[in-house]
Every structure is written in C-alpha cells, then in structure tokens.
Image: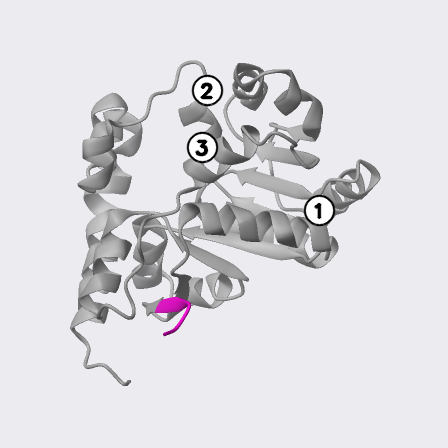
Amino acid sequence: MSDHCVLCGLPVSRATMKQTLDNILARIGQRKGTWVLTLNTEMLARFARDPHARDLLAQADLITADGMPLVWASRVKGPDQAIPQRTTGVDLVDAYLRLPSIPAYAVIGGVKPAATLAKYGEPAVRACRYLFDGRVDLSPEQIREFANALRENEVRMLFLALGGAKQDQLAFMLRSAVPDLVLAGVGGSFEILGPQGERAPKWMQNAGLEWLFRLTREPGRLWRRYLVYYPAGLGLLLRDCLKPSRR
C-alpha cells in the first residue's frame, strides 16, 4: 500500500495530522530541509489558469490534503489510496504552538501574527525567533535578508502566512537559500487562530463547508476565491477521479 495518493498529478500524503506533525518534528531534529505544502482547492484551480503552477508545487517535499474534497477524491480512487483525514495549515500551526517543547520557529506574513502568538502564551512567544509581517516583494535582496535572519536566529521551522502563488514562490526560494530549514505555507492560519478569528463548527469542517463559513464572514474579500476560482479546482479534481486507473 502506498504512503501517498496521486491527485491531479501530485503525491498527497496519506498520513494523519498527528503523523504529519511527528514527521515534521523528526525532520526538524534531523535538520532535514523540507517544504511542506498544504494542498487546497484554490491551488488546484491555479492549474487551470496557469499550466506552470503544477510544476512549482510538485517541488514540495511533503504534500498534505488541506480540504475535504481532496480526502473524498482519494476515497474514490480506492481503499488503498484513501487519505484518512485532512491536514490543514491551521491545524498544523495550532498543534505546533501547543507543543510542550516548541522548536525555534519564525513567521513571515499574516495579519497581526504577534497577537496570535500572545494568545498561545509565553512559550509560543519565546520560541518565535523571527517575525516579519511587512510587505513581501520576492526581490533577491529581500530573500537574502530573510535567509540571513533565519540562519542568524537559528530558526528550525518557518511558517509562511501569505497565501496565493507568492507564498509558494517564497517557499521554493527559501528552501534553496536555507537548505536545512523546514517550512510550511499556511495562508491565513494566524488570522483564523488570532483573537478576532473563528473557525467553522466541526460539523461544517467535516462536511467540507468551512469555505461557506468563511464566505459568510468576509463575503467582500472571499467571494471571488470561492465562487469563481474554486469550481475550476473542483472540476479538475473530478476529472482526475474519473480517469481510468493505471495501477
């Protein structure tokens, strides 16, 4: 039985959330550089608009299913391909910040990430060695600045809270610049986990309706993402499920 399921050409891990976190912690301890990609429907939608988007995401070392549609799609492919549960960026950040001993980490991006860290208490604040919530422009100068700061502060884990293609591009650049770093793109996780944030009820998460919960909270900002872009990603996922198996 394979340890991953291939969805839309990408190998998505079949590990549970806890197994994924344990894997990340092991890689941190081994100083084994890793780009963790939490794959969601929005990313799949990019494939329809940009043929090269898949090529970039395929460079990730560990891909998890961030979204119930990916979990359901894996089950369609057969019991030996089924992903047991989704592993989201929000859940990874939350579990990491609750660890009894938190490896040194950094945050780039996010909306008021310091307020989120304060919510988790002194251990989470103390373990954060570097925090940047200014403008990210992906310039060579800024990449060098980030890389130097991460090395000087002996950061072992980096959370990129930018969202969109910029987050993936920065992950790819920093993985090359700081080869022993473990990094994960987590989008709006720090905002959701912050003092003003709120997650969807568990039943909505399990039913794949977390997007609807977020849309009702921020319709002006999120309508295009969920009502225009997401259907293209879902269509791509459906076509992938209907393709004849090559096994």
Reply above or below: 181 against 5.
above
Residue 179 in the image: x percent, y percent?
72, 57
Q: Mark 3: which secondary structure?
A: helix
Q: Mark 1: which secondary structure?
A: helix
* Residue farthest along the right direction in this orientation: 152
**CA distance for labels 3 and 1:** 22 Å
**CA distance for labels 1 and 2:** 27 Å
**CA distance for labels 3 and 2:** 8 Å
Residue pictured at 56% horizontal, 40% vertical? 160
- For mark 1, does the 10 Å Cα neighbourhood hold few (<14), some (14 to 19), or many (20 or more) residues? some
Residue 13 in the image: x percent, y percent?
42, 61
Amino acid found under the numbered disc labelled 1: Ile
Residue pictured at 54% horizontal, 48% vertical? 22
Residue 233 in the image: x percent, y percent?
26, 56
Q: Specify start and end residues of the magenta stretch as a single range.
A: 1-5
Q: Is residue 94 left or right of residue 210?
A: right
Tell me where residue 137 sits by quadrant.
Answer: top right
Magenta segment's dominant SS is loop
Do residues under tags 3 and 2 come within 8 Å of each other at their CB atoms?
no
Do residues under tags 3 and 1 come within 8 Å of each other at their CB atoms?
no
Query: Can the viewer see residue 62 in this picture?
Result: yes
Q: First in sequence, mark 3 or 1: give its number.
A: 1
Query: Can the viewer see residue 170 in this picture?
Result: no
Amino acid found under the numbered disc labelled 2: Gly
Residue pictured at 23% horizontal, 81% vertical? 245
- For mark 2, does the 10 Å Cα neighbourhood hold few (<14), some (14 to 19), or many (20 or more) residues? many
Location of the C terminus (image quadrant): bottom left
Between label 1 and label 2, give the one nearer the viewer. 2
The residue under label 1 is: 143
The residue under label 2 is: 194
| Disc sitting over residue 189 in the figure | 3
